[in-house]
Image: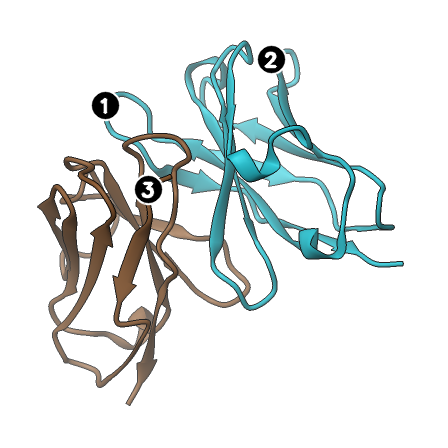
């Protein structure tokens, strides 16, 4: 199975900060990576697919980049509603594994 | 609008089976793959498997092989996920999700989640 490692696992930031989360794959997955946001008690929400394509309705402050084994999710200016846990998921080959998550909290 | 509505919470005893449903509406059911993902209390997301649009093909994560069965009923636009030989570690919220499809993948619409508690 392809392993995904997110860093950091926990991030404390302020409103307006630029935030970057990294996801590293144990083997190359081309651009077959998705990013999700999850708030407590809610289902995940798709933010980015194909590594860098913004899902319809997602604010443009979210962006994704990378290919192969290293990927990043960037929030250009953190908003109060962005405090949540973020997960990457590889969709290159079954099983479609997730990273362990990155919790973004208010500083 | 696209909706995935899951069945309600369940409490099961160890060794029993669970069967969760996920009823789709607002899109052409027979064109989309459906995933199942679970989340144990306080833990991350775990992908369980996927079923193709016609229901003729499935792929399951190795750790669930032999215990999980995913099916779909096109007449009612409903997907089912059965997990057998339940143990306490199976206590989790279970989600169904529609796959984007095409050359891009990812769950673009999700059900509300079904909490399954396994306890004696």
Whole-angstrom CA distance, mark 3 to mark 2, is 32 Å
Subunit that carries the residue with mark 3: A
Quadrant of image for the C terminus of chain A: bottom left
Residue at left 33%, top 48%?
A3
Question: Same chain, marks 3 and 2?
Answer: no
Residue at left 51%, top 59%?
A42
Can residue A38 be seen here? The reply is: yes
- Identify the disc placed on residue B63: none
Mark 1 and mark 3 in contact? Answer it, CB < 8 Å.
no
Identify the coloring: by chain
Whole-angstrom CA distance, mark 1 to mark 2, is 23 Å
Disc 1 is placed on an element classified as loop
Can residue B81 be seen here? The reply is: no
Give coordinates of residue A70: x percent, y percent.
14, 51
Residue at left 54%, top 27%?
B25
Q: Nearer the viewer, mark 1 or mark 2?
A: 1
Q: Which chain is brown?
A: A
- Identify the disc placed on residue A2: 3
Subunit that carries the residue with mark 2: B
Q: Which chain is cyan?
A: B
Q: Nearer the viewer, mark 1 or mark 3?
A: 3
> How many residues crowd mark 2 within 10 Å: few (<14), some (14–19), many (20+)?
some
Quadrant of image for the N terminus of chain A: top left
Mark 1 and mark 2 in contact? Answer it, CB < 8 Å.
no
- Identify the disc placed on residue B74: 2
């Amino acid at each position: 199975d392809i392993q995904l490692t997110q860093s950091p696992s926990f991030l404390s930031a302020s409103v307006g900060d630029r935030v970057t989360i990294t996801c590293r794959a144990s083997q190359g997955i081309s651009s077959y990576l998705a990013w999700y946001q999850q708030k407590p008690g809610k289902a995940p929400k798709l933010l980015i697919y194909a590594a860098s394509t913004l899902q319809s309705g997602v604010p443009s402050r979210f962006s994704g980049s990378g290919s192969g084994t290293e990927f990043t999710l960037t929030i250009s200016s953190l908003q109060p509603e962005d405090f949540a846990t973020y997960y990457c998921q590889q969709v290159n080959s079954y099983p479609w594994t997730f990273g362990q998550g990155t919790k973004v909290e208010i500083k | 609008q696209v909706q995935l509505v899951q069945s309600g919470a369940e409490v099961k005893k160890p060794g029993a089976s669970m069967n969760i449903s996920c009823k789709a509406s607002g899109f052409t059911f027979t064109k989309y793959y459906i995933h199942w993902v679970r989340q144990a209390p306080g833990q991350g997301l775990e992908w369980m498997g996927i079923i193709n649009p016609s229901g003729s093909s499935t792929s399951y994560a190795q750790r669930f092989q032999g215990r999980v069965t995913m099916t779909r009923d096109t007449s009612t636009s409903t997907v089912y996920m059965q997990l057998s030989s339940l143990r306490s570690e199976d206590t989790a919220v279970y989600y169904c999700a529609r796959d984007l499809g095409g050359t891009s993948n990812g769950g673009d619409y999700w059900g509300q989640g079904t909490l399954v508690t396994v306890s004696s």
